[in-house]
Image (tube, rainbow, N blue to C red):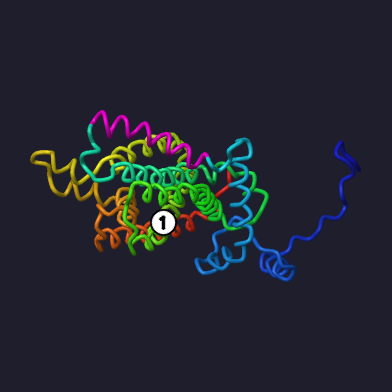
Amino acid sequence: MSSDLGPEPHHQPPVLPYAEAEELARRHGMTQVAVRPSLGSYIKEIWLYRHLMWSLAKGEVVSQHRDNYLGILWSVINPILLGVAYYLIFGQLLGLSRDVDNFVAFLTVGLFTFSFISATLTSGARSLLGNVGMMRSLAFPRVLLPVVKVISEFVNNIPAFLVLVVIALITEEPVTWEWLLFPVALLIVVVMGLGIAMLISRAVHNVRDLANIVPLITRLLRYVSGVFFSIQVRFANIDDAPRWVGLVLEYQPVAVSLTLVRETLLEGFELRWETWAVAAGWAVLLFVAGFVVFWRGEGTYGRA
């Protein structure tokens, strides 16, 4: 007997019991996909795929600049052009340059550091949605995707961070031992960015509409995090303002990150243990929370 689809088989293959099928798959090195491994196994798996992570990060950096003549230099040019505009508007027109010494260095440190944080937030938000085909085709720890975004953004911003040192020298900031803490401050900011990227990527994957709110959040953070003004000075000029509001603005993750970097390069910002303790605390909290939250969603990423 036959049908339009071809001859009908006379003998159906036997259906194996679940235990036997599981043993057969294990014996041939097959593992079930789209499941969440244990936390320990997940960390080991990430280490095994570290070479894939570096390859993806390298490809991300190259692809971002392959259509530009100046390539990675745009990571320096864009913040500088934005800094010139902010200097004219906020520094000269609104007179905010009177709030701090060496407003040029103050402004550029804030802009360059915030540019990295905002890029991490924006690219991390779509790190999963932009790689659905890859997730459906390959088996690998999905957390590599937001991590790759943060690594590539940091590599893109390395020239900008080096320019910060040059600007500090040009504006006659004294070279002190605190400058040795500049890479440490950047490391704390990167760890914080990793946590933010993992959290936002999981949130946007679950609720796609949140991706439309990310640009608004980025703009809001730019204007409340002291990128181009001193939070302490501006808040002190507000009569009868609750002290706790100023503390929240000053020590929220983005604002304290900017202060952290400024304390390493600018003489006008004294090195304070409070800044480093809060910044390190935010970095650890966001990284651990982001990793655990992302891991709990492993096995759901890439599904329709």
Does residue 4 lie above or below 150 as drawn? above
**How many labels were placed on the picture?**
1
Disc 1, SS: helix
Q: Which residues are magenta?
A: 74-94
Q: Residue 274, relative to residue 202: is it above or below?
A: below
Residue position for label 1: 186
Q: Residue furthest left?
A: 240
The residue located at (53%, 41%) in the rendering is: 73
Q: Amino acid at mark 1?
A: Leu
Q: Is residue 91 left or right of residue 244?
A: right
Horizontal and vertical percent for residue 32? Answer: 64, 60
Residue 173: horizontal and vertical position, in percent? 32, 52
Q: Is residue 147 magenta?
A: no
Residue 75, position as x, y percentages in the image: 50, 42
Quarter of the image for the N terminus: give it.
top right
**Residue 89 in magenta?**
yes
Residue 244 in the image: state x and y as whole percent: 16, 49
Residue 271 vs residue 131, the one in the foreground: 271
In the shown orientation, is residue 40 left or right of residue 131? Answer: left
| Quadrant assignment, res 176 | bottom left
**Residue 260: which quarter of the image?**
bottom left
